[in-house]
Image: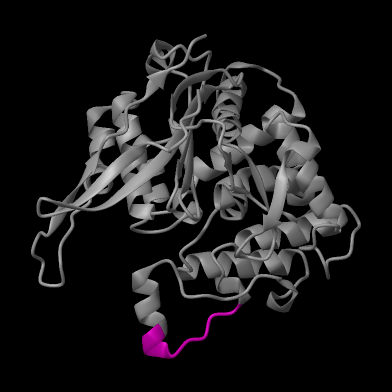
Amino acid sequence: MTPAVPPIAATEYRGDAVENTHAAHVAITDADGTLLYAFGDPSRVTLPRSAAKPAQALAVLETGALERYGFDDADLALMCGSHSSEERHLERVRHMLEKVHASEADLRCGGHPPISDDVYRAWIKRDFVPGAVCSNCSGKHAGMLAGAQAIGAAIADYHLPDHPLQIRVKHTVADVCDLPDDAVQWGIDGCNLPTPAFPLDRLARLFAKLADAADRTAREDAVDARTAALARIYRAMTTYPELVAGEHRFCTALMRAFDGALVGKVGAAGSYAIGVRASPQTARHGARGALGIAVKVEDGNQTVLYALVAELLAQLDIGTPTQRAALDVYRAPPMRNTMGVETGRLKLTLALAAQPR
């Protein structure tokens, strides 16, 4: 039964005093969509924000745009990413635009301060004003330009909800989440593209499907086109984790540490999703094949989000102790003031409940 009040998953202490509490929801499924574990409301309608990028990239991939314009897996990883505006990210977006005979002026995302503090300091020293290429979503937008052209649609309004490409994206997102089109709500994201909202357990199912597709293509001689496309997205993100996020970023650290065994993606305002490839560890949890994990922190706190994701991997015993140790700085984030004095701690109280099957 869904709790009337979302349960507290983490508490921040300053000294012995409680400063903040953070409610959260978790859904853990297998690729068939069977709900294995939950915390809070696993069916909470959630805006995954950038965690939905793999599904949006799938729609572009299925237009044939990547083959038509010579996009490789690194380009695909950037289409799924929320990059840090490092020079390698900006250069790749510019090259993607060149491949589709478009320019920065064709992008319908806006510039903003970078996610990376190192990049931000460099920009300040140069008095640099970021443009559309510097948007953390510019890879997705460059992919959308390619997708629009691949289906013979105009690129001028590729970002609008009624554009032929966005209609195609909406159907693909719903379909890959095993939902009817009208079961997905749509708003406008920070980068100016339509952004979906659907139950949290469907986000877990989406990422379990990504991992399952990677497993199936590794063991089967032939798979259907949708499975091949999902496997390619998984392969791109796990092969190029530095393009999905950047240096000193959680997504990059996570996928580097687990070396292809899982894929992960953050979404703004406290959403995260992971797809774990099948293993004896996933089987112990009753998963038929791959495992999907989706998290939503009610107040959108990103530090708490990463701590909970790292905690979930530990509770589920995913990977090795060495792999999980690479995330210790996120699981127990240091809380210090400007003089480096420790001022408090984060206590995690997330307790998964096994679901009846």
* Residue 222 position (above or below residue 262): above
Q: Is residue 306 left or right of residue 103?
A: left
Indicate left or right for 174 with 353 as reference: right
Name the residue furthest top. 357
Residue located at (57% from left, 46% from top): 48
Residue for point 77% across, 47% down? 169
The percent coordinates of residue 291 (x first, y second) are 49, 24
- Whole-percent x and y of residue 250? 37, 50
As for residue 5 lying within the magenta part, the answer is no
**255 w.r.t. 130: above or below:** above
Quick one: 56 or 256, which is closer to the camera? 56
Q: Residue at x 71, y 51 (%)?
A: 186
Q: Main secondary structure of the magenta part?
A: loop
Write the start and end of the magenta stretch as one range: 124-131
Residue 13 visible? The answer is yes
Task: Identify the image's colour scheme: rainbow, by chain, secondary structure or one colour.
Answer: one colour
**Residue ID at (74%, 37%):** 183
Q: Residue furthest bottom?
A: 127
Q: Position of residue 226 (x, y in %)?
A: 73, 31
Residue 32: give x, y in percent of width and height.
Answer: 61, 18
